Amino acid sequence: MKGVVALIVVDNPSLKVFERFQKEIEPIVGEGNLSMNASETIAKGKYARLLLMGMPTDRSDLEGNECSVNLSFQTEAFADGIFAQNDAYDIDNAIHKCMVGMGFRRTFGPEVLDNADSRIKRVTSRYSRVYTGQLLGETTET
């Protein structure tokens, strides 16, 4: 009788990425002024958003076991006021340091994109990396 073979799937690290994003970016934008939800209402002042764009399999075997995935996020930095565009770029710079610190590389941006409210400036960047189960700076539990 053959034993049961378990399918190996690389975990979805979205919440781990958001926790580190929150820890590093919340002091800049203010408590509660960030989310992972595209439909979240933007607060006045400064705001940041992290959106999962996808996690397609990068490498796998014929049995469906995943060796690695290509993890991608879009980040958005919002600001309003007299120096809105400068503030949005400052937030984006902090986001860039955070994302690079987790092993991501920028694949798009930073670019100022239109926003529904023209008084609010939005700087968007996209990041991607091959993920095999561990973010940079994470320690493995033994």
Image: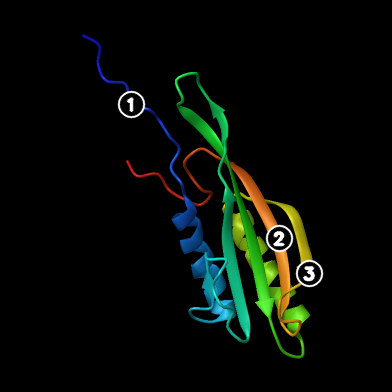
| Percent position of residue 17, x then y | 50, 56
Q: Is residue 122 above or below residue 119?
A: above
* Count of numbered tags: 3
| Percent position of residue 49, x then y | 59, 68
Q: Secondary structure at mark 1?
A: loop
Is residue 10 or residue 94 the one in the foreground? 10
Amino acid type at image mark 1: Ala
Q: Is residue 35 above or below residue 85?
A: above
C-alpha span from label 2 to label 1: 37 Å
Is residue 47 or residue 29 the one in the foreground? 47
Is residue 16 or residue 4 the one in the foreground? 4
Give the numbered dot on residue 47. Answer: none
Q: Residue at x 72, y 74 (%)?
A: 115
Indicate which disc, 3 or 1, sits on the residue closer to the N terminus: 1
Q: Which residue is mark 2?
A: 125
Indicate which disc, 2 or 1, sits on the residue closer to the N terminus: 1
Q: Residue at x 65, y 67 (%)?
A: 76
Indicate which disc, 3 or 2, sits on the residue closer to the N terminus: 3
Q: Which residue is mark 3?
A: 112
Packing grade of label 2 (10 A; few <14, some 14-19, many >=20) is many
Q: Secondary structure at mark 3?
A: strand
Q: Which residue is mark 1?
A: 6
Q: Residue at x 58, y 47 (%)?
A: 54
Cβ–Cβ below 8 Å for labels 3 and 2? Answer: no
C-alpha span from label 3 to label 2: 9 Å
Instruction: Point out the residue furthest to the bottom here.
Output: 82
The quadrant in which residue 79 appears is bottom right
Amino acid type at image mark 3: Val
The quadrant in which residue 9 appears is top left
Amino acid type at image mark 2: Ser
